[in-house]
Structure formats: structure tokens, C-alpha cells
Amino acid sequence: MTAGEPDAASRGRVTITEIARQAGVSVPTVSRVVNGRSDVSPHTRARVEELLQRYGYRKRPAAPGTRAPLLDLVFNDLDSPWAVEIIRGVEEVAHAEGVGTVVSAIHGRSGDAREWMRNLRARASGGVILVTSALDMVLHDELRVLGVPLVIVDPAGSPALDAPTIGAANWSGGLAATEHLLSLGHRRIGLIAGPPRLLCSRARLDGYRAALEGAGLALDEALVVPGDFHAESGFAGCEKLLGLPEPPTALFAASDQMALGAIEALRRRGLRVPEDMSVVGFDDLPEVRWSAPPLTTVRQPLAEMGKLAARTALELARDERPASPRVELGTELVIRSSTAPPATGAGGDARRGGRT
């Protein structure tokens, strides 16, 4: 091995970002060289190609006779019915197009994400659908250089400027859920919020806040407790709200799973829904229509989001430009039996008989 030459263990594992750094150029410039673009100076092209060859970096070959033989669908985790609905939508479109789907969970760990990237390079994936996950910029650059289209569903942070995003009207959903409870006469309305790093969580909180302001009510920070979209955090959040000197008479949980956890916390205390506390969820998962009582919730079109993400990824694989880089599907309030006016003599403002 000559001086400066990478050893066998490092060959093929170098990132595009590192190649760009060593060549003294930008990542897009390396991408243009890898993809055979002509808009690179001969000197720069020679330098980048020398580094690519030294590290054994090769663009993933496309499968013969196919444009998008596989779609990669990537989640942070798969332990939620929410993920199943997204998968169902993606699978419906992929199956109709004769395309396979590879489902992965990276659990928010960089090691898992890098292992997934290694597997991706080994297969002929026509596109990646990333669901509420944050992909670090190094891996994002790898996808761009490999020429693999990326579509983001419900982006975790600020939407990537060069990737289409599919979301739902989370703000208006949070507004509708809270306005429904206000229309029933509730004035102390608790919120079990989602993870603050997620745009969808922040938008639902903002919708809740806007509804309160529209009703002339100030936001009471004590009535907002954190959650993570899972049932356990809904249970814990409801317990915290019930421990307040003046508990709420109604509760908006920013996911159906958290709403179900909250209902269990109420049940264990001998409290009834909606007689003692009204509960609204968010998602309209299939099982909530069979909960006891059936859950009032904001319907988020999860399967439709999956379908649109798959169609967009396939369009990009065919070098077609999507109609819009950011699509937001509508949400809808579905009223069932878990909400009702506050009982006479209930705590909070209801005990005083009306609006503050």
C-alpha cells in the first residue's frame, strides 16, 4: 500500500462529503461528476474522479429494464398503527406499479441510518420515502449523489429545500379539535402535545393556542403537558393534568394513541368519558371507532399521504417534476361519543357557569 492510499477497510466507506472536502469542491460538484454531467471543468473532474477511484466509490447501477424496481420506506420506528396506515398507502401504489417496497426503521440512531444506507447502495432502489425522520446531511448528500429521489412525509424539522414534502393540515386540525370543545362549553382544555422537534406537533399546538385566543382565553401553560405520540405518554400526561388543583374538563391529545392512554388513566381513577372529561384525539386510526367510548378525533389522511408520497417518488424516478414541492392534505374533525358539554358542577370554569 502506497503512502496516502486508503486501506481495504476504508475503501468504499468514504462519504461523498469527505470526497468533496478532499477535492476542495462542493458536494453538488461531486454529484455532477458521478452522474456524468458536462458542467464541470476538466481539472476539477480529473481530481474528483481520481478520489472516487482511489476510494472505490461507484454509483449504484440501475436494474436493467426497470426505472424504480424498489421504493425504500423509512421510519424512526414501526411500533404504531400510524405507521401501518402509511405503509398501506405506499404499498397500494407500489403494487399497482409493479414496484416492491422495502420498509426500514432507523430508531433515530446514526448507526442504524448508516447501516440502512449501506444496504440501500447494494440494491436498486428507485426512491426513498422518509417518514417523520431526520436524516443527517451526510446521508442526504449520499442520496443526492447516488441519484436516488427523496420524498419526506411529515418532515421532522425544517423541510429539506431540495426534496418534496407531504404533510397534513395540522394547524387547522388542532384548531378544529379545540374549537369543538369550546363550542360544547369547555373553558379549561388540557393539551397533551407531541414531540416539540416535529413540525406537526408544533402546528397542532399552535392551532390549539389560536382557538383559545379566538375564544378570548389566555393560554394556561399548566394545561399543556408533553407527550411522544405513544399511549404511555398519554396516560402520564392525563395523570399530570388530573393532579392540578383545578383539572381541565376536556382534553385534546395530539395523537389517538395518547388519547387512548388518557382514557385509560381516567378509567383507573373511576372517571367517565365524556361525563367527567371529554377527550379528542388526532389521526382517526381504525381502532378508535371501536374504543369505549368511540373517540372524537381529527382525521389525518395517513393512507392518502402514503399514496401521494409513493406517486411522487415514482414521478421523480422517471425524471418528472412534481406539481408542487410541498403538499398539505386536509384534515377533518370526526365527532363521536367521547365529547359532551361539561357536567353541571364540574371543575374549572364550568363550575362558574360560562366563559371568562
Image: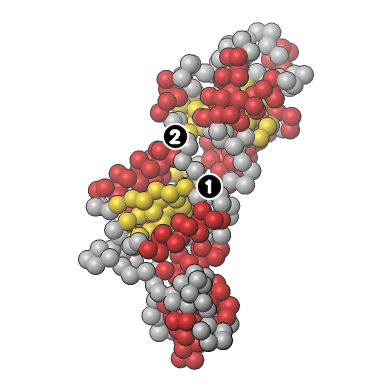
Q: Is residue 215 above or below residue 317?
A: above
Which residue of the protein is positioned furthest toward the bottom in this rendering? 43
Viewer-proximal residue among 208 and 240:
240
Residue under the image location 50 percent in, 28 percent down: 297
Provide the residue designation for mark 2. 81
Q: Is residue 62 left or right of residue 137?
A: left
Query: Residue 218, image x and y in percent?
Result: 73, 31
| Crowd rating for badge 1 (residues with CA inside 10 Å; few <14, some 14–19, many 20+) | some
Residue under the image location 58 percent in, 14 percent down: 267
Query: Residue 221, image x and y in percent?
Result: 74, 33
Could you say whether the residue bearing mark 1 is in a helix, strand or loop? loop
Q: Give, as a three-letter code, the residue at label 2.
A: Pro
Which residue of the protein is positioned furthest toward the top in this rendering? 344
Query: Residue 135, image x and y in percent?
Result: 53, 57
Q: Is residue 232 above or below residue 207?
A: above
Provide the residue designation for mark 1. 107
Q: Is residue 205 left or right of residue 100?
A: right
Q: Earlier in the sequence, mark 2 or mark 1?
A: 2
Which residue of the protein is positioned furthest toward the front in this rendering? 1
Which residue of the protein is positioned furthest toward the left in this rendering? 65
Quote the CA–CA distance across marks 2 and 1: 16 Å
Residue under the image location 44 percent in, 77 percent down: 56
Looking at the image, is mark 2 or mark 1 nearer the viewer?
1
Residue under the image location 61 percent in, 19 percent down: 265
| Crowd rating for badge 2 (residues with CA inside 10 Å; few <14, some 14–19, many 20+) | some
Could you say whether the residue bearing mark 2 is in a helix, strand or loop? helix
